[in-house]
Amino acid sequence: CNASHPDWPCIRDAQYATIRTRLTCGLPLRADKTFSSFRTLQGAKTPILGAAKAMQWAHQPRGWLVLVGKFGVGKTHLALAAAEELLSRHVPLSFWHSAELIDYWRQLIADSAWDPLSHIRALGERVLILDDFGAGRITEFAIENLEILMDQRYRMELPTLITTNYSDAEMEGRLGGR
C-alpha cells in the first residue's frame, strides 16, 4: 500500500476482496440496503407481505419470487437486501437492472463477443436478481433473449428474484404472451 500517494487510499486485502465481490455481483459498493433498514416512503417499518416473502426467499432461495408494485414502494431495496443476505452467506449471485443486462448483451454483440447460450448458461450458475424487469426499450432482441433466460431458469428450477412495476396484463402487453 502506497500511503504517500494522495489519490489512492490504502485498501487492505480483505477490503479489496469485498469490493471486487460486490462489483462482480453487480451490487453497489455501499451495503446499506438491508431488511432491517427497510422503510416505506412514510418512514415506518413495513409489515407488508413482500418484505416477509423477500426475507424468507433470501434465507432459502428456491424457486422464483416476483415483487410487483408501483414506483417507490421499496422493491429494489428488498431485492438488494436479499442480495446482501445471500452475499453474507457466500451464495453466488448476479444482480442486474434489466435494462443494463440488455445493454450489456448489446455491447457483447458490438464487440463480436456475443454467444447467447453460453452467457445465459453462465447466469444459470448463480442466483439471479433482476431488478425493474420490463423497463427500458423493449425490442425483439430483448424479448427473445429475456425469454430464453427466463425459460432456462424456469426449466432448471433456478432461484430467481424479479422486481417490476408492471402487472401481469401490462407485462404481457410489453413482452408478449409468455
Image (cartoon, rainbow, N blue to C red):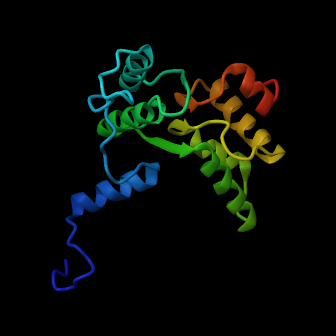
Pinpoint residue 25: horizontal percent, then vertical percent.
45, 49
In the visual, does 129 lie left or right of 109?
Answer: left
Instruction: Specify the farthest residue to the front.
Output: 42
In the visual, does 53 lie left or right of 164?
Answer: left
Q: Quadrant of the N terminus?
A: bottom left
Pinpoint residue 124: horizontal percent, then vertical percent.
58, 38
* Residue displayed at 20% across by 72% down: 10
* Residue displayed at 44% across by 31% down: 74
Q: Against 27, is 176 above or below?
A: above
In the visual, does 49 lie left or right of 67?
Answer: left
Say which of 5 and 172 sits in front.
Answer: 172
Q: Which picture quadrant has residue 151? A: top right
Say which of 131 and 12 sits in front.
Answer: 131
Q: Which picture quadrant has residue 3? A: bottom left
* Residue displayed at 66% across by 55% down: 103
Q: Quadrant of the C terminus?
A: top right
Pinpoint residue 114: horizontal percent, then vertical percent.
72, 58
Pinpoint residue 37: horizontal percent, then vertical percent.
28, 33
* Residue displayed at 49% across by 43% down: 95
Q: How many marks?
A: 0
Instruction: Specify the farthest residue to the bottom.
Output: 4
In the visual, does 108 lie left or right of 82?
Answer: right
